[in-house]
Image (cartoon, rainbow, N blue to C red):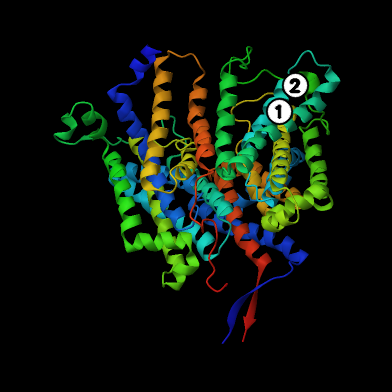
Amino acid sequence: MMEILNEVLQVGFFAAILRIATPLILATIGEMFTERGGVLNLGIEGIMVLGAMSGFTAAYYSGSLWLGILAAMTVGALAALLMGLLTVSLGLSQHVSGIGTTLLCTGLAFFFYRLIFGQPSVPPSVEAFHVVPVPLLSEIPFLGPVLFNQFALVYLALLLVPAAAFVLYRTPWGLALRSVGENPRAADGAGVSVSKMRYQGLAISGMLMGAAGAYLSMAQFNAFTFGVISGRGWVCIALVVFGQWSPWKCLGGALLFGFVDAFQLRLQASGVVEIPYQFFLMLPFVLTIVAMALVSRSATPPAALLVPFRKEER
Amino acid sequence: MIRLRLETRQHTPTWLKVALPLCAVLATLVLCGGLVALAGASVLDAYGKLLLSAVSSKFNFVETLVKAAPIAFTGLAVAVAFRAKFWNIGAEGQLLAGAMAAAFIGGRAALPGWSLVPLMILCGMLAGALWALIPALLKTRYKVDDVVTTLLLNFIMFYLMMALLDGPWKDPLSGYPDSPDIRLDAEFPILLDGTRLHLGVLLALVAVPLVWFLMRRTTLGFNIRAVGENATAARYAGIKIPLVITATAALSGALAGLAGVGEVGGIHFQVMAGLSPGYGYTGIVIATLALLNPLGVIPAAFFFAVIITGAEAMSRATGVPVFLADVIQGVALICMLIAILFTQYRVRVKR
């Protein structure tokens, strides 16, 4: 048992937690924003696939990884606007619209990837993001290599959390977003445009989900594969519930998931435990469900989540 | 000045319920035609291949029916669940559960040969139902969102299956991560000599009217619909909602399990990684296009079977990526959702 712990609890392990958690942080904070406005975005899985694909393609042809991130965010926002058209403007079922958006975005990603790259024997790849050590801070023992010797996107994801908390709780815009998610009728009476706020919440979610997907195909890996997301989007939906719609708690959930995932990867690689590796792949999903079961009774989602708002109906 | 106004409908005429899915499909094909053109193919040629391959020969037609069977089952599974607003996105995992149960039973040497097929069907239904009970219990006991759990359980079931196939269940003869073949006695009877038209297709065809009867003419069906339409009213009427949700989940899971049983008993005779190319998710599209009516599942499942089989032929002939079939499923689901608005509202022209 001790050798396993020694094997696992190294600086590299804690750095890996952050790297693994980053796409989850981005997408979970995005999902939290739209849900705070009252719209569940189940397009998340597909938008992440499409973000991974379009980000990779843009980077491959432009040679600029950051242009890839920008492309992924733009495409993600467009997909989220489609969600807005369906759920906000037309008031359709958020569950089924989201599944439709995921099916559509996944299909589009695969379709265009095959159209653009064909079926080469060696899949195309890009030179992925390098780590950017923060001067001085990265020299600190232990904390330095864990926190300050990471991809730029990791720093951005970590900075996103306080920024999201500030925007949500300390700005008029955040108040307006929360109010349309809790009591749209009252918000409308106070002169807040419910549909505008919900569209904006969705757009933020789409951009962050796109970026999360692009992180996977351009930082964590250096190519797009069809299984690049493989359920991470659905995990983020659970993490928002687990994080009780609060940015800091969502970060906690994402780090916890990162911990479990990094742990299983180490355990697999160490070869100390002889269990089929699929059980390790399964573990984060099982724990996510267990965590949901523990918190769901006490979780209070935004009151108007899933409820379409029609101004003319009283 | 002419103004358009939306009015709520009290009643949806039957012709509209037939016309709307057709319009949604038409709109889908028009929209996706843009993608075909973008891929540099002639839209007419590509669509000719996509839509007509299924009826171009007896062989292709039977193959289309064979493809329609599993997605008819998952379509029924989703239609039943969504009626109760139990958001079962987990037909994929329940299908795998049913397939694994069928392959396990079908390989038992100790069982008498005649008992294999009926036992595979029963155990496959049971396995699917049990797997669907997990999200139902989590929802009724712990208020855990059913969408999330059913989705996550799909991945858990897939990895569980792969772990078994990579370990104790690996076929010792082939060495691939596939399960050993089921016994010859366990293979589903073929209904038409020289084809793959197997018992599972007939089962799907029989299941449709049975599920329709259950939903329309039995107390359970009434309760399922009542819970879905107005849970508060159902509670006041004395319906035990957790019980109904649990029964709905079991029924839905059993139907999805049958999809897997048919694939093992009639097509693959084993389980392996590629057993279901997303049939569970296709079921959602089919159920929506059928307006959650079991009878509508037959034409909807047939249509998507045409698309899935035709996409291969289209891709070979014109170079349009085969994934057009996936895009069509997504677009069709979205178009149908929009079309459903017209069952609730009518457009009135005011002068």
Residue B322 in percent (x, y) is at: 56, 42
> Above or below — where is B327 with respect to A124?
below
Chain label for disc 2: B
Q: To which residue does mark 1 refer?
A: B264
Residue A52 in percent (x, y) is at: 41, 42
**N-term mark: 2 or 1:** 2
User: What is the residue that sits farthest to the left in this orientation?
Assistant: A136
Task: Bin the neighbour count of mark 2 within 10 Å (Cα to Cα): few under 14, some 14-19, many 20 and up.
Answer: many
Per the image, label 2 sits on a secondary structure element best described as helix
Of residues A108 and B233, the one nearer the viewer is: B233
| Amino acid residing under circle 2 | Gly
Question: Residue at point 23% right, 26% down?
Answer: A142
**Can residue A75 be seen at all in this image of the molecule?**
no
Residue A311 in percent (x, y) is at: 52, 71
Q: Are marks 2 and 1 in contact (CB under 8 Å)?
A: yes
Q: To which residue does mark 2 refer?
A: B106
| Picture mark count | 2
Choose top left, top right, bottom left or bottom right for residue B58. Answer: top right
Give residue B70's mark: none
Question: Residue at point 63% right, 35% down?
Answer: B134
Chain label for disc 1: B
Q: Quadrant of the C terminus of chain A?
A: bottom right
**Can residue A176 be seen at all in this image of the molecule?**
yes
Of residues A251 and B316, the one nearer the viewer is: A251
Choose top left, top right, bottom left or bottom right for residue B204. Answer: top right
Q: Quadrant of the N terminus of chain A?
A: top left
> Above or below — where is A192 with respect to B221?
below
Residue A288 in percent (x, y) is at: 49, 35
The label nearer to you, 2 versus 1, is: 2
| Amino acid residing under circle 1 | Val
Of residues A83 and A40, the one nearer the viewer is: A40
Question: Residue at point 46% right, 66% down?
Answer: A195
